[in-house]
Amino acid sequence: MSIHLFASVFNSRTSYPWGVQPPGLEDKDGEQNNPPVIQEEIVNDLLMHLDTCKSRGPDGIHPRVLRELAGELTKPLCIIYQKSWSTGEVPDDWRVTNVTPIYKKGQKEDLGNYRPVSLTSVPGKIMERIVLSELSWQVQDSQGIRASQHGFMKGRSCLTNLISFYDHMTRFLDAGKAVDVVYLDFGKAFDTVPHSVLLEKLANHGIDKFTLHWSDSQNTGTVLHSECKCHPALTQHECLYEQCPFPATAYIP
């Protein structure tokens, strides 16, 4: 009950209906017929830099175990990651997500005033970082990200954005020109991004089909467990772990 109610607030207009798959995604250029190769050095480096203070995922695998056994786990994990990327299939354990609603502001009875935070498999998150790195490289290589983009860019932040903005504005003012500023704040910006539209845009930028299919598969058929301990409108029974097999399109890893 609770997971359905909570998901209904964030799940609208973010994906195709349950059981309906998006149209086939192919890279527009069609030049890359093989998936990117995952190097063992990259997997080992990610394992060695895991934060052992982080919590374990729903699969029960703690980051400390992965870090201390990095030498033994690098090769088998590399094989699993490469196979997953090549076939576009995501292991079931990586699909299980513990979602905890974190109260933000407003009335606590309104589910829209909660922020969904998810806890996923640590090996699955390592794979996501590998895919993200390749995805970022391909998008930047195709100039899909403008130089004016500061959010979620390595080496950039709100500070660099403000400095750039201040520089542009002062130049206009020094030239005697009028300056008008419009601020936009999108409500639930991260929770309402349509994944189907996002994948289509990535395809238009020439992202290879293996990465597109893996990203699509990763966000389809995820099993959510609601771990709600703060919502007064829900009973203790409703707040226990409940399964809901619908596409997870609104969660923060």
Image (cartoon, grey):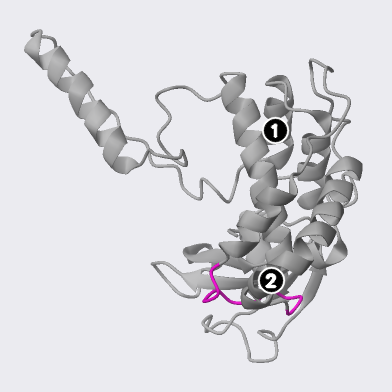
164 to the left or right of 94: left
- Asked whether 63 or 243 is in front, the reply is 63
| Residue furthest to the front | 71
- What residue lies at 56% left-to-right and 19% top-to-bottom? 143
Q: Position of residue 166 (x, y in %)?
A: 19, 28
Q: Depth check: 209 or 71 in front?
A: 71
From the viewer's perspective, tell me whether residue 116 is left or right of residue 212. left
Q: Earlier in the sequence, mark 2 or mark 1?
A: 2
The residue to which callout 1 is attached is 197
Quarter occupied by residue 36: top right
Name the spot of residue 15 as percent of width and height, x first. 74, 45
Residue shown at 76%/75% (left/top)?
Answer: 59
Residue nearer the viewer, 204 or 238: 204
Q: Quadrant of the C terminus?
A: bottom right
Quarter of the rendering containing residue 168? top left
Q: Position of residue 9 (x, y in %)?
A: 61, 59
Dot 2 corresponds to which residue?
66
Residue 84 in the image, given as x and y percentages of width and height: 86, 49
Dot 1: few (<14), some (14–19), or many (≥20) neighbours within 10 Å?
few
The answer to if 66 sits in the magenta stretch is: no
Q: Mark 1 is on which residue type?
A: Val
Residue at horizontal 79%, vertical 62%?
95
Q: CA distance from mark 2 to mark 1?
A: 35 Å
Q: Nearer the viewer's eye, disc 2 or disc 1? A: 2
